[in-house]
Image (cartoon, helix red, strand yellow):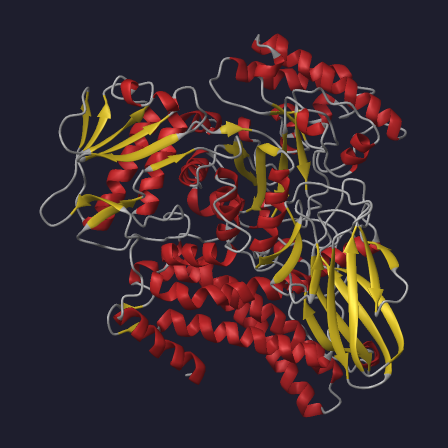
Amino acid sequence: MNKNILARLLLLLIFLSNNIYSQDKNAVNFSIADSNQLTTIYIDKNTDELVIWAVNELADDVKEITGKRPEIVPTQTISKKGIYIGQASSDLFKSKSKDLSGQWEKFSIKKEKENLVVVGSDIRGTVYAIFEITERLGISPWKWWADVHPIKKEKLTLLLPQKGIISSPSVQYRGIFLNDEDWGLEPWAEKTFEPEVGNIGPKTYEKIFQLLLRLKANTIWPAMHPSTKGFFTLPGNKEMAQKYHMVIGSSHAEPMLRNNVDEWKPKIHGDYNYFTNKTQVDKYWQYRLDELKSAQNETIMTLGMRGVHDSKMEGAKDLKESSDMVEKIILNQREMLSNTFKKPLKDIPQAFVPYKEVLELYDNGLKVPDDITLVWPDDNYGYIRRLSNEEEQKRAGGSGVYYHISYWGRPHDYLWLSTTQPGLIWYEMTKAYENGAKKMWIVNVGDIKPAEYDTELFLDLAWDINSIKSDGINKYLKDWITRELSSQIAEYLSPVFEEYYRLAFLRKPEYMGWSQTEPTTQIKLSDFTEEECQKRIKAYNNLVKEVDVWNSAVSVDTGQLVPDERLNAYFQLVTYPIKSAAYMNHKFLYWNLACRASDVNEKKKYETLSNGSYNKIKELTDFYNEKLSSGKWNHMMSMRPRNLPVFDSIKKAEFSKEASVKETSKAIKFISANQFISIKESKEYQWKTINGLGYSNNAITLFPLKQKYFKTEKPSVSYDFEIENVGNYEIEIHLLPTHANNFDHQIEVQIDGNKTQSFSINTKDRDKTWKENVLRNSAIVKLPVSNANKGKHTIAINVNQTGIVLDYITVNTKI
């Protein structure tokens, strides 16, 4: 065993024996079960069916932990000792919950004398309160979806703050988009979970809706790829959404809740072209509205029009013609909505998603009625393209965000593992919220698995934007691992995940072939030097060792650090993603080294290591599908989404002159952005570090995150470094490739007090530089320094506005 890890195991034993995990001294205890008693749950006799379901889930969760199931008793009064659960409007709570009346999804959990009183302002608020309790008892929202089975206990106590909990959502509509499901969710539903339907049907959606309620979410954009039947075309889907009070929306490409790729039939309907086929398109949209008129589903209508799938609207000759037609289409759609539902338009939730080319239409003057929610998309790689300016923030419909943690498209897919850095999610979504995006947040989760952590982080922020601070991202991760696995292992596993995300920030596993898609290109040698390859291999080797050690580590006091109940969860949440990422890196990095090697034996060694890494990914994936949880997840995990070249094994490594030519410079200094020697800021805006953001893990930006231009006194940061030898150098300033509304992020750089140089940071549209930037998560400013003197040098950087994020600086020399 690695000596360092052995030492840490010994420290852990001391850590446990001293019982460092102390409880909050100010917490209020409410006993639910012990060896002598089991607390009864009381509900109003007229309780809604969804609340009854959630109460039964709570009772089942208690039974899974203690072996005893609480009795659920209808009542009209609060008298006997117990847990009282219900809506504020019920007879049971009317007199004690006036502050909840009329609120959206708000809830209260308080200990009152000998009772626990749990009240929600509405049905979903009450359900969220119930699942707040289950989570505090140690039940993971991923109990079913990641096999995080409860840990058995005889005594079960709920800990609460002294004043109880009062909570309500920061964002009104919070949910997920099931997308690119061809490689996991759909084949799993079709062949394993719901073969009787042969697709993603009501049984699958029921499990998804149950998960979303446990995550305090309320909105679904259903799966919509050609492999999947349209949500409304399968009997039981919309009824299941109604049962679980789930709000149904649809993507940027699916106006009026129509799944075009499945439902638009050219042989029946003609061309999907509003210029030439308006009558048929209107009839097509009206059909869905008529279907919903008699249903009780909550919906959010996406308005506008694009192509049948993820493409431009058909028929327009130029940008102006597109813009004019989209405006007419929106007015027509709104007239349909008003006539069908007989409501004022302001009472019918509507959204407009300016995605890809539609953002260009909006930026060029397309008018969107004031009560429609503007849902701003990211650039598909985690950087939000645009946010509401001061005028747009006054809109009655407000704004929201459509965000990706999974994507199919150029410059390259990332459909396999979920490696979007938590710090980036935190930064972009907090920035969005501070700029008014409070109406709707939707995250593209792909197949759900293996995006469990990033999904929950996103939805937790949507529920309570203040729940995680800029210096609390790593603590949130540690707390998550504690709940999913154990408190003992979280202490040492959380740094493993921090490094996993940091390494992927420089290059996601899916990008390691240095290939691209649309059009698909073949793999090629990386931009890493030989030294960088070796360093990265070592970093991933360390992660693999940690994963293996903590999986099997044993404590004298507690037995296995990963309890038996959580071993399947450990594989899904830890082993598979971290090891697969490591082996994908090894596959390409060893191949790169083989291509550089001139010695035959050395070349053969690296080729063997590369091919062995491919085989390890295959073994892990086979286990995931065939053996994990007794085959429960068969067909869920593909190791080659879309069959792209990056997922193939490396057949042979030829010596490449290209490999040696690439090694032209070496970083002799690495300066994290938070290692500044001085800063210039104001009372209104200050530089802060976001721990867990960037390749440095310590990126800095200006707080607050609200949009602000600086015309005169520009905030700045300064750094120094020492050069040992006179010579020519190049300084690289690495920034996150964030976007400004007007694509006008600028920095000014001054070296040693010399002339200031100005640089534009943003890239527009989908040009070559943007592709490079998102694949490496870095916008790079390069400054040559000729005949630099030996000794200390200073770099000063100022910014023209908020939203610019500095990651790190390197000083490079030619080699």
Left-right relation of 804 to 205: right
Percent x, y of residue 742: 81, 40
Q: Residue furthest front?
A: 683
| Placement of the N terminus among the 4 image quadrants | bottom left
Residue plotted at (58% across, 38% down): 442
Residue 353 lies in what quarter of the image?
top right
Residue plotted at (38% across, 55% down): 484
Percent x, y of residue 434: 62, 39
Left-right relation of 137 to 507: left
Percent x, y of residue 239: 44, 25
| Placement of the C terminus among the 4 image quadrants | bottom right
Percent x, y of residue 392: 71, 28
Q: Is residue 480 above or below residue 658?
A: above
Left-right relation of 83 to 1: left
Q: In this rendering, does residue 777 appear at all? A: no
Left-right relation of 295 to 25: right
Residue plotted at (87% across, 83% down): 727
Q: Is residue 202 above or below residue 327?
A: below
Q: Is residue 251 above or below residue 13?
A: above
Residue plotted at (89% across, 30% down): 318
Q: Is residue 768 above or below residue 466?
A: below
Residue 357 lies in what quarter of the image?
top right
For the residue pair 505 and 616, the one nearer the viewer reads as: 505
